[in-house]
Image (cartoon, rainbow, N blue to C red):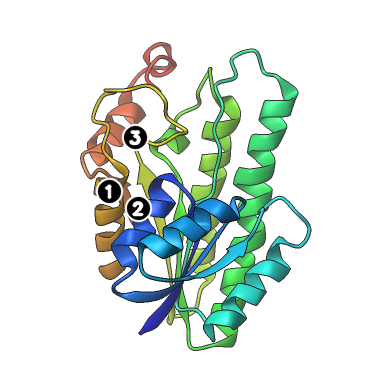
Amino acid sequence: MANAIIVGASSGIGRALARELSGEYDLGLAARRTDRLRAVGEDIGGAHVTRIDVTEPDARERFDGLVDSLGGVDLVILSSGIGRYNPDLEWADERDTIDVNTRGFTALATAAMNHFEESDGGHLVGISSVAAEIGSPSMPAYSATKAYVSRYLEGLRYGAGEDISVTDIRPGFVDTPMSPDADRFWECSPETAASQIARAIRTDKDVAYVTRRWWLVSKVLGLLPDRYRAGVM
């Protein structure tokens, strides 16, 4: 059985992905909250569990340790991320979003690629967002950092060897703790998102929208004048 690591597996999309992929991979799960991670591991019948805060200096070292405990890794999914409603531009909220979504993401994306290059290849999956395609007046750091994730994954894909795959997952609205508003336009469950992400992984997609209808939304966003775009996301 192949080995996979899911970072950000304690809740939301990451937790749903652990359940979705548990029959296909020997899983390593990472997040800040080890009590929730252990609960996820028990729920899926066992997993290697490690506390990783992607913003801490030892994040890469802990990631390497998790890889070693699995005996190598074939698939790495980076699902950790935060987004805060912040129209008043409170610096603490913007700083935390940048730290997690850019610095933390990059630390583990590069660690994963290093492992793949030293072994027989692998597959890196990053969770970006449809919000990456348009600036948000209420969550400016979130949309900007997700745009960074998409462009960074694109750069990694262009530079990767033929045995390394890189997939950019761009969800629309998913019913997670980070998205408290209920019944939003085309909102899906974490389980539906996980099912479609797993399909994108199996088919080795470069970019996948979740749900797939958000691909159409992204194209419409690109055509809207600025005066309408600001109120969309």
Residue 205 shows in the view: no
From the image, tell me which residue sits under label 2.
16
Counting the numbered discs, the total is 3
**Residue 3 bears which disc, if any?**
none
Q: Which of 182 and 122 is in front in this view?
A: 182
**Residue bearing the label numbered 3:** 175
- Secondary structure beneath label 1: helix
The residue that label 1 is drawn on is 191
Res 91 quadrant in image: top right
| Label 2–label 1 contact, CB within 8 A | yes
Could you tell me which quadrant the N terminus lies in?
A: bottom left
Quick check: 141 left or right of 2?
Answer: right
Residue 117 drawn at (x, y percent): 57, 82
Q: Is residue 114 visible?
A: yes
Q: Quadrant of residue 233?
A: top left
Residue at horizontal 36 percent and vertical 42 percent from the top: 171
Alpha carbons under labels 2 and 3: distance apart: 11 Å
Which residue type does callout 3 highlight? Asp
